[in-house]
Image (cartoon, helix red, strand yellow):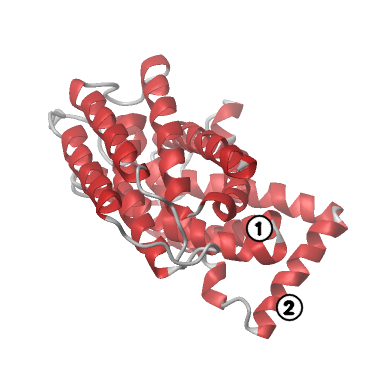
Amino acid sequence: MVRRRIGLVLGGCIGAAVAGQARINGALGERLGDGVAAAVISFGTGLVVLAVAFAVSGRLRAGLGEVWRALGAGRLRWWQLLGGLCGAFFVACQGLTVAAIGVTAFTVAVVAGQLVSSLVVDRLGVGPNGRTPVTLMRAGGAGLALVAVVLAATGRSSDGGALSMPAGLGGPKVLLIVLPVLAGLGLAWQQAVNGRVGAVGGPPSATLANFATGTVALLLIESVVVARSGWPTAFPTDPWLYAGGAIGVAFIGLAVLVVRWIGVLLLGLTSVAGQLLMSLLLDVTVPTGPGLSTTAIAGCALTFVAVALAARTRDRIS
């Protein structure tokens, strides 16, 4: 099926974009000394891009009207518009942790959470493709991915980086791995509910809902941070550090479309391949934090094995 094959390729492109965004937002969070502020900037710029697009396009506004009508008729539930909360947490984790652990370790941790969550989301039928059974191959692949996280996280120096938090708002170093895993758990649910919204109002409407809810949540969190530690005093002038929001608009909108073609788990698996390839490339060419290690490479290799194992099962919807 041509559409399915195209979806597999696009899933890899989505993963590569996610890794690129992680590098950008991680660097911005390190420069600001505040990963949450970096996430606010990323989501805020993305929301501005979308607001301009909806302001000049009647077709986009019509799609948004379909979403509101579906809510009124009960074809959509209000909580299906909250995928952006998981997206906001994911972007905040980029800003908080990537500078300390590198793109590769961050990606492996996210992958583990994403694969496990994809199994559950597909089984419950949260996404637009309905229910998909949990098979031994799928469960085994997800379990192997968890082992890969442990492997990638071992052997790191205890003198490594820390969370990119404002002064006075530190946290234990275990969060450097725990936070990306939790972010990965939320990604599959985000993709599923965004796909539901996109099936009604189109990918742009789902992307707008994602960025609107995420920006509001991040502003509330950052208001607490600012009250305790103050807003960052200096902002970097490198333009590329502010490109994370535009990249997010592109890959979230694309994921809304692709998830309807290949399902949540397969989208997760293909994006994993793109994330890992791009993250390895970034850690070699423009390293952040400790860069590559033998255990990080081994963790990535093991994750590829997990992806192959989980992908051997048929992705049939029941």
Badge 2: residue crowd in 10 Å (few <14, some 14–19, many ≥20): some
Percent from the top left, x then y, of residue 277?
41, 26
Nearest the eye: 221 or 253: 253
Nearest the eye: 68 or 42: 68
How far apart in space, not on screen, are marks 2 and 1 (Cα)?
Answer: 16 Å
In the image, is residue 63 above or below residue 154?
Answer: below
Identify the residue shown where x is 38% and y is 47%. 93
Q: Amino acid at mark 1?
A: Leu
Q: Quadrant of residue 151?
A: top left
Percent from the top left, x then y, of residue 158?
12, 32
> Mark 2 or mark 1: which comes first in sequence?
2
Q: Which residue is mark 2?
A: 69
Identify the residue shown where x is 16% and y is 29%. 156
The label nearer to you, 2 versus 1, is 2
Badge 1: residue crowd in 10 Å (few <14, some 14–19, many ≥20): many
In the rendered view, does 294 fall on the left or right side of 93? left
Q: Which residue is mark 1?
A: 208
Would residue 244 be seen by someone viewing this image from the given angle?
Answer: yes
Q: Amino acid at mark 2?
A: Arg
Percent from the top left, x then y, of residue 302?
24, 32
In the rendered view, does 90 fall on the left or right side of 56? left
Q: Quadrant of the N terminus?
A: top right
Q: Quadrant of the C terminus?
A: bottom left
